Amino acid sequence: MQTGERLLCKRQVADEIERLARRREKSLANMAFVGYQRLAFGDISEAVSLLYIDNPDSQVLSKMDLFSVSEIKRPKDGSMEIKFFDRLKALEKLEGRVQSENGVQSLFDAIDRSASAIGSEAGND
């Protein structure tokens, strides 16, 4: 048996590998959560401004936040089509994560209560 195989057979090493794998999985889940937040609540104004630029060069494009753009087409007639990722689907993913983490309330319920509270505060002014 080689050194690497012997190390992998040790309980301590196997536990550390498992711990690191769980940590990586959680990190990836957190990155996905942040991505869904950007899709659900992010600004699309830079992407929309593309409609008013005739021939954007790569330097201009590299400075733009196009995270929410799923597809850009320029048909032969010279027009431009921009498709965005679905914000409602991103909200559903966020809601699913929130429900699975705490199981107490949905994201939509929290947003609804916040909006109601803001509305009632505005009415009291």
Image: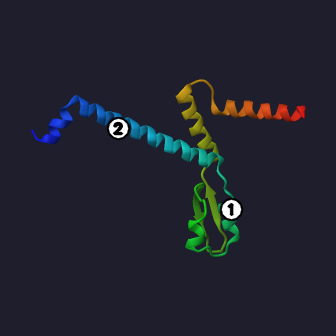
Neighbor class of circle 1 (other Cα within 10 Å; few <14, some 14-19, many 20+) is few
Neighbor class of circle 2 (other Cα within 10 Å; few <14, some 14-19, many 20+) is few
Q: Is residue 80 left or right of residue 25?
A: right
CB of mark 2 within 8 Å of CB of mark 1?
Answer: no
Where is 47 relative to 33, above or below? Answer: below
Tell me residue 42's x, y (percent): 64, 50
* Quadrant of the image occupied by residue 93: top right
**Could you tell me which residue is drawn at 56 percent across and 25 percent down?**
103
**Residue toward you, 105 or 14:** 14
Which residue carries the number 2 mark? 20
- Mark 2 is on which residue type? Leu
Which residue carries the number 1 mark? 48
- Mark 1 is on which residue type? Val
**Could you tell me which residue is drawn at 13 percent across and 41 percent down?**
3
Mark 2 or 1: the one toward you: 2
Q: How many labels does the image show?
A: 2
- Colour scheme of the rendered structure: rainbow
